[in-house]
Image (cartoon, rainbow, N blue to C red):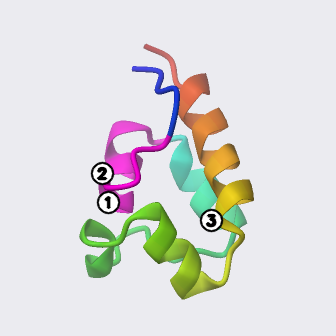
Amino acid sequence: MRPSAIDPNMPVSEIMRIWPATIGVMIRNGMLCIGCPIGMFHTVADACAAHVVDEARFSAELLAAMRAEPD
């Protein structure tokens, strides 16, 4: 599944489950969402605010990783 945009309501744990390549994006940006119990509640915006990460840049990186996943 190749999304055209980030779903603003999708929790980061769901994004990582569906598109495993996004885990690398999380790690590169110093986000400790992998395995975090809050990940099932945090959206991308929530996680970016909590980790002081630029949401637009991070979302673009996530989307690129999501689109690169094999079908």
Local SS, label 2: helix
Q: In this view, does 66 lie above or below 42?
A: above
* Picture quarter with the N terminus: top left
CA gap between label 2 and label 3 equals 16 Å
CA gap between label 2 and label 1 equals 5 Å
Q: Which contiguous range is marked in magenta?
A: 6-20
**In percent of the image, x 29 and y 79: which residue is there?**
38
Local SS, label 1: loop
Question: Depth check: 67 or 43 in front?
Answer: 43
**In percent of the image, x 68 and y 75: which residue is there?**
53
Residue 14's disc is 2
69 displayed left or right of 46? right
Marks 1 and 3 close (CB-CB < 8 Å): no
CA gap between label 1 and label 3 equals 16 Å
Determine which quarter of the picture holds residue 21. Answer: top right
Local SS, label 3: helix
53 displayed left or right of 21? right
Residue 11's disc is 1
Q: Please name the amino acid that badge 3 sits on.
A: Ile
The stretch drawn in magenta includes residue 70:
no
Crowd tier of the residue under label 3, counting other residues whose Cα lies within 10 Å: few below 14, some 14–19, many 20 or above: few
Comes first in the chain, label 2 or label 3:
2
For label 3, the residue is 27
